[in-house]
Amino acid sequence: MRFQSIMDFLERFNSNFVVLLCHHNADPDAICSAYTFSQVLRKIKPDLKIEIAAQGLSKLSKQILGTLPIDVNMSPRIEEAEVIFLIDTSTLKQLDDWMKRIENTGKKLILIDHHPLHPQTKNQAALCIIDDKASSTCEIIFELSKEAKVRLNRIEAQALFLGIIFDTKHFTIANSNTFKVAAELVNCGASAEEALSTLSLPMTSSERIARLKAANRLRIYRIGKWLLTVSHTGSYQASAARGLLSLGTHVAVVGGIKKGILRISMRSSNEFYITTGIHLGNDIAKPLGNHVQGIGGGHSTSAGFNGEGDLEVALRECFKLIKKSLKN
Ligand SMILES: [Mn+2]
């Protein structure tokens, strides 16, 4: 039993105080799994002192902290802990300058994660609870709570529910076990309606205006069956590009210059990537650096470029690269 192996481990190292560390810019999966896991530990081992910590929180995580009683410490007492847990964190590098402190203490590490086990972390961790088929670390924590025979209360269930919804991109990449876990969480009192409102960020008025301006200044190009749109805004280029995608374009390129820095955000639909194989990060944003001064990169359907120079020239080069890639 995985939960029992954790308890045996804590017993063996006479643990009175443990730290649960989340990766930097902690996302909802990280903080919510740390929270519910800490609650499960408290129920089984009431004397154990527990601290949850992260180097910075994502916007959504901050919003969650406003609705759930999760305490996240920004300066954890790493040196005082008997055992350190790494939650949703596949390498120590994701802990920034805490990495050195952890390595210097030589304290025992327990890893709980759903990312494939990194060889270096395997050497550093004394115990690894890994399930790379799980949708999220929250899903693993739910399984651990069942092993521990702890019935989750409404708030603990809601936390795991939030982490799962976030990591599965609102269940679009969930598997059948994820849905089973979600159903059990709802039985414990989790609410989908509440979760969806917690996970939607209110848009600021300047962001709305940037999106609307981008739509207003739009240029539309048709290449074969694909619609490509190019536009510009002073800020919120990424949000504007996402907005254009939801309006119906296949590829959106939005640029802007602020304080001398040229920024370009690119987004494409999944359909565009799957059909054409064009990877915005590798095929467009990176090579854009050969034509315009700056550095680009990113993912298959979401990429960015930062540099300097003339915006119009940069947008034109970007368009040319997409056109050329489509011809190949
Ligand atoms: Mn995760």
Image (cartoon, rainbow, N blue to C red):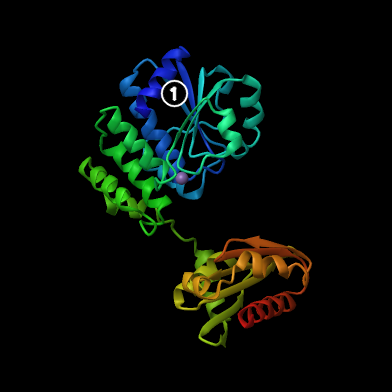
Q: What residue type is labelled 1?
A: Ile
User: Residue tagged by mark 1?
Assistant: 50
Location of the C terminus (image quadrant)? bottom right
Viewer-proximal residue, 120 or 238?
Answer: 120
Give residue 315's position: percent from left, percent from top: 68, 76
Identify the residue at image location x=22%, y=40%: 188
16 lies above or below 283:
above
Q: Can residue 236 be seen in this view?
A: no
Q: Residue at x 49, y 61 (%)?
A: 204
In which quadrant of the rendered image does the N terminus lie? top left
Q: How many labels does the image show?
A: 1
Q: Give the camera-side residue of 132 and 86.
A: 132
Other residues around mark 1 within 10 Å, as few (<14) / some (14–19) / many (≥20): some
Where is residue 251? Give x, y as percent: 55, 75
- Kindly indicate the quadrant of the structure image that contains residue 324: bottom right
Residue drawn at the location 38% of the way across and 41% of the way down: 138
Name the quadrant containing residue 76.
top right
Of residues 261 and 184, which is closer to you in this image? 184
Q: Would you place residue 13 above or below residue 181 in this image? A: above
Please provide percent x and percent y for residue 225.
50, 86
Can I make out residue 219 in this image? yes
Q: Which residue lies furthest to the left in this view?
A: 187
Quick check: 140 above or below 167?
Answer: above
Percent x, y for residue 25?
Answer: 55, 44
> 271 or 189, which lies in front?
271
Is residue 47 left or right of 62 when viewed as pictured?
Answer: left
